[in-house]
Image (tube, coloured by chain):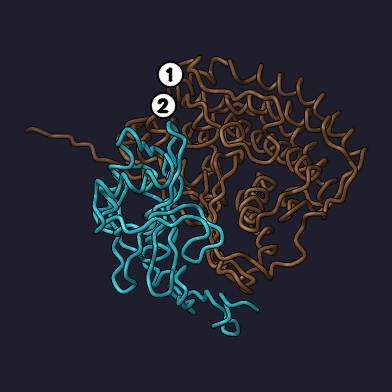
Chain colours: A cyan, B brown
Amino acid sequence: MTPEEIFDKLKEKFGEGKILRLTLPSQNGFDVCDPFIDVEPLAMTELADFLKHDKDLAFDQCCCISGVDLKDDLQVVYHLFSMSKLHKICIKATAKRDNPIVGTTAHTWGVANWLERETWDMFGIKFKDHPDHRRILLEEDWEGFPLRKDYKFPRFWRGMEVTPEEEEGTYGTQD
Amino acid sequence: MEHKIETDFMIINMGPQHPSTHGVLRLELKTDGEIVMACRPFLGYLHRCFEKHCESLDYLKIIPFTDRMDYLASMNNNWAFCIAIEKLMGIKVSEKCEYLRVIVGELNRIASHIIAFGTFGLDIGAFTPFLLAFIQREKIFDLLEEASGARMLYNYIWVGGVARDVDGDWLKKTKKFCQEFKPALDEVDELLSLNKIFVERTANVGVVTKEMAISYGFTGPNLRGSGVNWDLRKNEPYSLYTKFDFNIPVGAGEQGQVGDCWDRYIIRIRECRESIKIIEQALEGISLEGDIYETVPKNFNKMPKGEVYARSETPRGEMGIYVVSEGGKAPVPYRVKVRSPAFCSLSILEEICKGVMISDVIAILGSVDIVLGEVDR
């Protein structure tokens, strides 16, 4: 199916309130991009279920889940692929920065469990009804979410020096 | 007097410093005697903030960092990243460079598979095949060192080209290696594949069904071991892979069920043979004329605004690179995300390690072939 057909099908099923818009390459200020659909973040759970189990869509493979810091908002990007129908689509769920919550897809794709945990770990995006909502790469008592653009590197962690004094404030900036 | 004897579950930490975890991975096993009731992996011991570093580095400076993700297949990592940036910038790479990339990429794939089945044998208790295979791995490293200047971390594939040219002598040496490698692989194959002890330990152990494999993000040899005929080199061809004639080995449950550890193991042995086929065809096709820097961009000042997701087949499966670029004069990417195949494959561990023996956990972990550098990034 082409991205337009996928978009129309989702819109017919879920309505305009949940499926927001479709962006094709060279639209909305993008020079290069894969076609993507913006959706309502809390609708992600039922949407994922439909995307996988509908027989025309059949998105059985969840390639990648990435977080992106858009400065005003936080975004979760899903790259999906169908091994039987050989089509792909990118879904974007944008959540508010002060309280980012996105519906989980871990019950639909097994791999989404860890990929969502990584997104929580790095961006602090909460996944509603996630079965195992813990950090994955960092320690459970780590403060802050490192991949956010406004992250400050800590001087100490559990009494250990993790940022040398002379380098404080210089990490994460172009030299 | 009546005594009631109760047994209790025992929590055992396997790792992080345990040779069969292939790096620093900790598994928390809840055991009832020899049976594992639950297995919880803990990662992050090798986390080096790759994605955070990318946000403050030029595009070219990121390539040496990709070497250090999957340090057993650095060429394929360089390549995966370059494919993404070339897609973003719309660069078409010259044919000579593509041939060179295919040759070094497949050589590195063999070197990586040697580690995979060598250490898998080692985990099970077979020491000799590991040593025999390492002789061949050393030869591959000599070839790659001559081409790139480094043994393991190459920084060889650049955006739009490769770092150094090769000469006719190198091609001859590579050809000679291909001929020598085939009997050496047969030797390992004979020693290990149908060894009764090895088959008993791996057949019918850690069975992953087709549906489970796709759902849990298995890719590459692991996915094919579960009986799915899927290889990005064939199904979504990039570079020059349409030009070559090669087969995709798929697990068929020859010793037990489809998708068991033995299937995942034998796929890697057979893939080495296919890689040799590809290298031999590429050596026939390559022409040494032409400039390798022809399509290398002079600078990265005019990046388009946008985002790409590019995936390619590394020895561990499908590596996806998601790059967001702000465009304009920004010399650094806004966001880089790596979809690491080993990270995704490892996520199945919790699911398939329920109710197996402790020794089987080691067999399962070895057969999935993880590299912790890539899992933690």
Residue B85: x, y in percent?
A: 63, 56
Depth check, front residue: B265 or B240: B240
Q: Check residue A135 in the rendering and tell me which mark sits there, or answer none.
A: none
Q: Check residue B207 in the rendering and tell me which mark sits there, or answer none.
A: 2
Residue A167: x, y in percent?
A: 59, 81
Marks 1 and 2, Cα distance to the nearest angstrom?
7 Å
Residue A138: in sight, yes or no? yes
Residue B219: x, y in percent?
A: 50, 37
Reply above or below: A14 against B257. Answer: below
Q: Residue at x 47, y 24 (%)?
A: B227
Kindly check if marks 1 and 2 are in contact, taking CB atoms under 8 A apart as contact. Answer: yes
| Kind of residue sitting beneath label 2 | Val
Q: Check residue B257 in the rendering and tell me which mark sits there, or answer none.
A: 1
Residue B12: in sight, yes or no? no
Q: Residue at x 31, y 48 (%)?
A: A105
Q: How would you rate the neighbour count of disc 2 (Cα within 10 Å): few for under 14, some for 14-19, many for 20 or more?
A: many
User: Which mark is first along the chain, 2 or 1?
Assistant: 2
* Disc 1, SS: loop
Reply above or below: B22 against B278. Answer: below
| Kind of residue sitting beneath label 1 | Gln
Q: How would you rate the neighbour count of disc 1 (Cα within 10 Å): few for under 14, some for 14-19, many for 20 or more?
A: many
Q: Residue at x 36, y 58 (%)?
A: A21
Q: Which chain is disc 2 placed on? A: B
Position of B178 with respect to B29 (left or right) is right
Q: Which chain is disc 1 placed on? A: B
Tell me the quarter of the image containing the N terminus of chain A: top left
Depth check, front residue: A17 or A117: A17
* Disc 2, SS: loop
Position of B78 with respect to A110 (left or right) is right
